[in-house]
Image (cartoon, grey):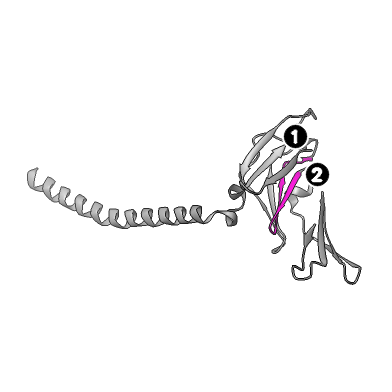
C-alpha cells in the first residue's frame, strides 16, 4: 500500500498484478471513496504469476514467476509514476516461483528467499543482490561520483591518446623511410 497524499496521509493506493490484469485501487479516507484504474501489463509478465515482488520508492520489481508449465528466471520492473515496464537482461541464476523478496533498508540489498523450481520442489534459497544493480537511480552519491570520475579519466585518456598515437606513427613511418 502506498500513501499518495503525503501532506494529509489520507489517500492510499494498492496495485494488483495477476497475469494479464493490472489494477490500481485508490482509497480516499476523507471521502471514504475508492477509484479503480486499469494498468498496463507487459507481454513478458502477463504469462506469469507466483512471482516475488518488492516496491521501492515508485518502482515495483518482479522476480521469477510461473507460467507455461515452467518457472521463470526473469526480472521485471514497473515504474508507477511513468506507468512503464522494463524487462532486465540480467536474470536470476535459477528459475524460481512462490518465493518472497525483502528489502534490507540499511544495506540497500534485496533478499529473495525460498520458492520452488521447475519440478515444484521446495527450495531453501537465499539470494542477496544490491538494489542499485536493478535501479541505477538508487546509487549512492559515492558510487555516482566514482562512475563520473571514471568516465572523465577514460575520456581524458582517449583524447590524449589519439593525438600522441598519431605523432608516434608519423615519426615511426619517417624513421622507417630514412633507414630502409
Decide whether residue 175 is among the magenta residues. Answer: no
Q: Name which residue lies at 46% across and 53% down.
A: 147
Q: In the image, 62: left or right of 93?
A: right
Q: Main secondary structure of the magenta part?
A: strand
Residues in magenta, as a range:
52-66
**Split into 4 quadrants, where in the image is the N terminus?**
bottom right
* Quadrant of the rendered image containing residue 65: top right
Q: Position of residue 85 (x, y in %)?
A: 70, 56
Residue denoted by label 1: 114
Asked if 128 appears above or below 133 in the picture, the reply is: above
Q: Name which residue lies at 76% across and 38% down.
A: 99
Q: In the image, 47: left or right of 154?
A: right
Instruction: Say which of 49 and 9 sits in front.
Output: 9
Q: In the image, 85: left or right of 177?
A: right
**Split into 4 quadrants, where in the image is the C terminus?**
top left
Secondary structure at badge 2 equals loop
Residue denoted by label 2: 49
Question: Going by the picture, which residue comes out furthest to the left?
Answer: 179
Amino acid at each position: 500500500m502506498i500513501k499518495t497524499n503525503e501532506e494529509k496521509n489520507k489517500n492510499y493506493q494498492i496495485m494488483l498484478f495477476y497475469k494479464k490484469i493490472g489494477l490500481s485501487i485508490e482509497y480516499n479516507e476523507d471521502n471514504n471513496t475508492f477509484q479503480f484504474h486499469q494498468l498496463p501489463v507487459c507481454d513478458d509478465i502477463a504469462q506469469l504469476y507466483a512471482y516475488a515482488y518488492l516496491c521501492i520508492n515508485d518502482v515495483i520489481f518482479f522476480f521469477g514467476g510461473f507460467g507455461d508449465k515452467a518457472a521463470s528466471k526473469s526480472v521485471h520492473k514497473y515504474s508507477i509514476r511513468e506507468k512503464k515496464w522494463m524487462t532486465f537482461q540480467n536474470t536470476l541464476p535459477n528459475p524460481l516461483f512462490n518465493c518472497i523478496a525483502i528489502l534490507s533498508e540499511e544495506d540497500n540489498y534485496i533478499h529473495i528467499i525460498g520458492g520452488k523450481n521447475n519440478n515444484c520442489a521446495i527450495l531453501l534459497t537465499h539470494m542477496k543482490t544490491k538494489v542499485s544493480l536493478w535501479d541505477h537511480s538508487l546509487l549512492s552519491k559515492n558510487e555516482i561520483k566514482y562512475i563520473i570520475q571514471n568516465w572523465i579519466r577514460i575520456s581524458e585518456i582517449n583524447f590524449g591518446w589519439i593525438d600522441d598515437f598519431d605523432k608516434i606513427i608519423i615519426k615511426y613511418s619517417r624513421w622507417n623511410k630514412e633507414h630502409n
